[in-house]
Image: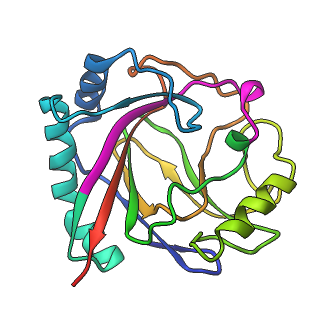
Amino acid sequence: MHRFGKSRAPVLSVDGLGPPPADIVALAASLAPFPPATNHYPGVRCIIRHQDRTVTAYVEALLEQAAPYIGGAFDIDSFDLKEASFSLVTTPAEALTAIQRAPHFDSIDPDLYAVLHYVRPNAGTAFYRQQATSIELVDQASLNRVVNSARTTPAPHGYINGNRGGYTCIGAVEGLEGRLVAYPARLLHSGRIPPGFIGSDDPARGRLTTNIFIRAHRS
């Protein structure tokens, strides 16, 4: 359990959950090729549909294994699966849009959490503070300040790494093969993509992750 930044933002990391990564790669390959992502993700993404029963069974079993850890880490009683997908980073650094070159948040919903399963080893995920506003966790009250500051601060060239472009890295989790990471969807974050990274749209070769969103329920 990590507590990052001034906000002590909770980030959970658990190893050894889910089936062997090679089996997950085979599941992803069964759905390939993935279409281009539509929400500023720098690559391709395949939404896992209910009719993809074998793949859905993997996601559901993974969440069942992770539930005690997630419940304890975030003090929640239960959660619903909102969306799951396989994702591969494929966009070259020089082709990124401005929004893709800066940290982002997925939602301001305080009950929405992101869950990542690193299927293949990679550099992981980093978490950030916006320097101009000192904000790490975005909510309704801070949304306009975060967005306005991002619009007026030039984004660094390439994928963000470390303290750049008006952001301070407050912590990171390494993307070990088979590791599960969970954090509030409103926490500023970005994938750690090293200089010289060459992406692939092949699940057996690329930076394959399972991206999941859950909504928490508390008594």
For residue 105, what is the image quadrant? bottom right
Residues in magenta, as a range: 81-98
Up the image or down, 162 lies above or below 193; here it is below
Left or right of 207 in this view: 32: left
Closer to us: 81 or 11:
81
Q: Is 156 in front, or is 214?
A: 214
Instruction: Identify the image quadrant of residue 214.
Output: bottom left
- Residue 117 drawn at (x, y percent): 36, 46
Q: Is residue 94 magenta?
A: yes
Q: Residue at x 44, y 72 (%)?
A: 110
From what the image shows, is residue 73 above or below residue 36? below
Q: Using residue 121 as the reference point, say whether residue 49 is left or right of it.
A: left
How is colour applied across the structure in the image? rainbow
Q: Position of residue 48 (x, y in %)?
A: 28, 34
Q: Measuring from the top left, give residue 32's x and y in whole percent.
A: 34, 16
Specify whether 28 is left or right of 10: left
Q: Where is residue 177, by image quadrant?
A: top left
Q: Is 35 colored magenta in this rendering?
A: no
Indicate the quadrant containing the N terminus: top left, top right, bottom left or bottom right: bottom left
User: Which quadrant of the rendered structure holds the C terminus?
Assistant: bottom left
**Taking 14 as reference, is 133 above or below it?**
below
Q: Residue at x 66, y 52 (%)?
A: 103
Of the pair 133 and 128, the residue shown nearer to us: 133
Residue appearing at x 25%, y 53% in the figure:
81
Residue 162, given in percent of the width and then of the height, sits at 74, 54
- The residue located at (18%, 38%) in the rendering is 56
Count every numbered label the image shows and give the total: 0
